[in-house]
Structures are given as structure tokens and as C-alpha cells.
Image (cartoon, helix red, strand yellow):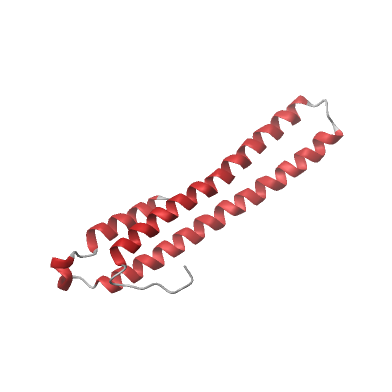
């Protein structure tokens, strides 16, 4: 899913004109479209990651409850540890997502600050 960010950053670097080529491309329209693409991609990825975290959290909670009832079950313990590890990875993925988003917005702002002012919701 992050290839969308890479594609948008590449598009920013290749389509937004430098000062000498300003008249050849409608930079404000291009920046507006790229802004909307970035917003959609970031919102979608964050929603999906949070959904996965919620789903895995409920599995971990269920396994913990089962573990309290059957403390001698080694297979259950292994499954619980596996799900806890998956949950931690997903939570760290949310942090990685924040870094990727920051990088994308930085490039967007560097390339488009002259051509397009996004709404204040960002």
C-alpha cells in the first residue's frame, strides 16, 4: 500500500515544474489531485491498520480468557504468544505509517506550497 506514496512522491518530483518551466504544466491542479490522492491513501491505510489491530486485540483477549481457564495448555500459550507478537507488529506498523506519512507530506509541501494551499484539516 505504501507504493501509492512512492508513486505520488515520484509524480511530485517529475510533474511539478521548477521556476523555469512554470508555464508548461497546471501545477495547482496537479498538486490538488496529488493532495487528494495522499489524503485517501493515508486515511485508507490508517483505517485498515487500526481495523487489524482491533481484530487481533479481540483474539488476544479471547485467548487470555481461555488461558486463565486452562493454564496447563501449552498449545494455547503458544497461540497466545503468536497473536501478541502479531499485535505488537501491527502497533509498530502504525508508528511506521506515521513516519511514511510525514515524509510524504514534507515532499508535498516542499513541491506544492507555491501552487496549492490544502484545506486547514491537515
The image shows residue 33 at horizontal and vertical percentages of 35, 69
Residue 73, picture quadrant: top right
The image shows residue 6 at horizontal and vertical percentages of 35, 52
Q: Is residue 56 above or below residue 41?
A: above
Q: Is residue 25 above or below residue 60?
A: below
Q: How many marks?
A: 0
| Front position in the image: 74 or 90 | 90
The image shows residue 94 at horizontal and vertical percentages of 54, 49
Q: Is residue 49 left or right of residue 119?
A: right
The image shows residue 118 at horizontal and vertical percentages of 39, 72
Please report the residue visible at 46 percent of the width from the left and 73 percent of the height from the top: 120
Please report the residue visible at 76 percent of the width from the left and 39 percent of the height from the top: 63
Q: Is residue 92 above or below residue 41?
A: above
**Residue extending farthest left:** 20
Q: Is residue 98 above or below residue 121?
A: above
| Front position in the image: 18 or 73 | 18
Q: Is residue 13 left or right of residue 74?
A: left
Residue 12, picture quadrant: bottom left
Please report the residue visible at 75 percent of the width from the left and 44 percent of the height from the top: 61
**Residue extending farthest right:** 69
Q: Is residue 91 left or right of residue 7?
A: right
Please report the residue visible at 32 percent of the width from the left and 72 percent of the height from the top: 116
Amino acid at each position: 500500500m505504501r507504493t501509492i506514496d512512492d508513486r505520488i512522491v515520484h509524480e511530485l518530483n517529475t510533474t511539478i515544474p521548477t521556476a523555469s518551466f512554470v508555464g508548461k504544466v497546471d501545477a495547482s491542479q496537479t498538486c490538488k489531485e496529488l493532495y487528494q490522492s495522499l489524503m485517501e491513501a493515508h486515511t485508507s491505510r490508517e483505517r485498515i491498520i487500526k481495523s487489524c489491530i482491533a481484530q487481533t486485540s479481540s483474539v488476544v483477549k479471547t485467548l487470555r480468557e481461555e488461558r486463565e481457564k486452562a493454564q496447563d495448555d501449552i498449545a494455547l500459550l503458544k497461540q497466545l504468544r503468536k497473536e501478541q507478537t502479531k499485535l505488537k507488529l501491527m502497533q509498530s506498523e502504525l508508528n511506521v505509517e506515521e513516519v511514511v506519512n510525514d515524509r510524504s507530506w514534507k515532499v508535498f509541501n516542499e513541491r506544492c506550497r507555491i501552487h496549492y494551499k490544502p484545506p486547514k484539516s491537515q
